[in-house]
Image (tube, rainbow, N blue to C red):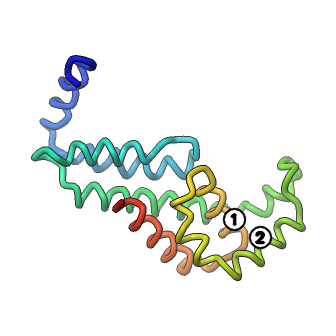
Amino acid sequence: MSEIFPDLQHWVDILMSYGGWWVYLMVAGAMFIEYVFPIFPGDVAIFAAGFLSGGPHVSLIIVLFSAYVGSAIGLSVVFLVGRKYGRRILKSEKIWFLNSKLLYRTEIWYKKYGKRILIFSKFLPGIRFALVFFAGIAEMPFKKAFIYISISCLIWNSM
């Protein structure tokens, strides 16, 4: 790898000389951004940090904890934005494919399957954001949603 990216090893060595704390911040930040900005590939940060945890400066346990914290905070923000502004966004008619009938069906769906939807949401890239956002719109209780989101994050990030 050093032949392909000669400067990469140099930069990794410099960063690692400061200790592994920057890796933990990077992972938590990347996982948070993945939900606030859904097209951001946050899972790549976990793979990179997992690779770096093979060295003496980075702990895999703390990497996984950082990923959980970043994911849980990001998903909570998305949930709360859905709760506070979701209906207003949907009623603005700027999103042409969403209507009141779909919103009603979504609320029924979350009342019936909300637990499963949120537990498996992390396993559905591309729509993770939307599933949590709609849970907020459907007014699922935050404590309940946070528990299911946490379970999802713990399972996904430990894989």
Q: Position of residue 120 (x, y in %)?
A: 54, 67
Q: Could you say which disc has been placed on residue 106 in the image?
A: 2
Q: As rendered, which of 4 and 27 lies closer to the eye?
A: 4
Q: Amino acid at mark 2?
A: Thr
The residue located at (40%, 48%) in the rendering is 29
Q: Is 31 on the left-hand or right-hand side of 55?
A: right
Quadrant in which the C terminus appears: bottom left
Q: Amino acid at mark 1?
A: Phe
Mark 2 element type: helix
Q: Is 9 on the left-hand or right-hand side of 36?
A: left
Choose top left, top right, bottom left or bottom right for residue 91.
bottom right
The residue located at (55%, 80%) in the rendering is 144
Crowding around mark 2 (Cα neighbors within 10 Å: few <14, some 14 to 19, many 20+) is some
The residue located at (66%, 78%) in the rendering is 113
Q: Position of residue 115 (x, y in %)?
A: 58, 78
Mark 2 in CB contact with mark 1 (< 8 angstroms): yes
Q: As rendered, which of 155 and 74 lies closer to the eye?
A: 155
Q: Could you say which disc has been placed on residue 134 in the image?
A: 1
Earlier along the polypeptide chain: callout 2 or callout 1?
2
**Relative to 22, does residue 125 appear above or below in the rendering?**
below
Q: Position of residue 42 (x, y in %)?
A: 45, 46
Mark 1 element type: helix
